[in-house]
Image (cartoon, rainbow, N blue to C red):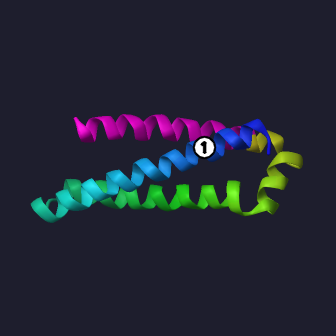
Amino acid sequence: MSLWLDAASAAATLNVVLLTALVGIWARNYLAFRSKHPLGLLVFGLLLLAENCLSVYYYVIDPEVAALLRSAAPVAGRAMTFVQILELAAIVFLAWVTWD
């Protein structure tokens, strides 16, 4: 696997771990307060978690997609890596704000 896809896989995996923890916190907050703010964060977190689980599947589990990104579309693979790393930075910041 190329360095780009390794970085994308690692970022997507970290995103899944962080989002799982955040979704748990937001679900608990929604159950405690029953307000729209934690519900909005919960729905957002679940959708982003689904997107990152799909990314991990594509990068790690499905060898055809990984091979395609390595060979036929290396620019797309690099772009996807950049997006995953930006997402990780945003989720880390969101986790910091949530846990503070």
Residue 21 pos. (x, y %): 35, 52
Q: Looking at the rendering, which quadrant does residue 74 occupy?
A: top right
Report the residue at 27% width, 36% height from top. 97
Q: Amino acid at mark 1?
A: Ala
Q: Looking at the rendering, which quadrant does residue 81 occupy?
A: top right
Q: Of all residues shown, which one is farthest toward the left?
A: 33
Report the residue at 64% width, 47% height from top. 9
- Examine the rendering and report whether any part of residue 40 can be seen: no
Q: Looking at the rendering, which quadrant does residue 7 occupy?
A: top right
Residue 12 pos. (x, y %): 57, 48
Specify whether 57 is left or right of 94: right
Report the residue at 10% width, 59% height from top. 33
The prevailing secondary structure element of the residues shown in magenta is helix
Query: Magenta region: which residues?
Result: 78-100
Q: Is residue 92 magenta?
A: yes
Q: Quadrant of the C terminus?
A: top left
Residue 57 pos. (x, y %): 64, 61
Specify whether 18 is left or right of 39: right
Q: Secondary structure at mark 1?
A: helix
Q: Is residue 89 magenta?
A: yes
Pointer 1 residue: 10
Residue 44 pos. (x, y %): 37, 56
- Examine the rendering and report whether any part of residue 8 can be seen: yes
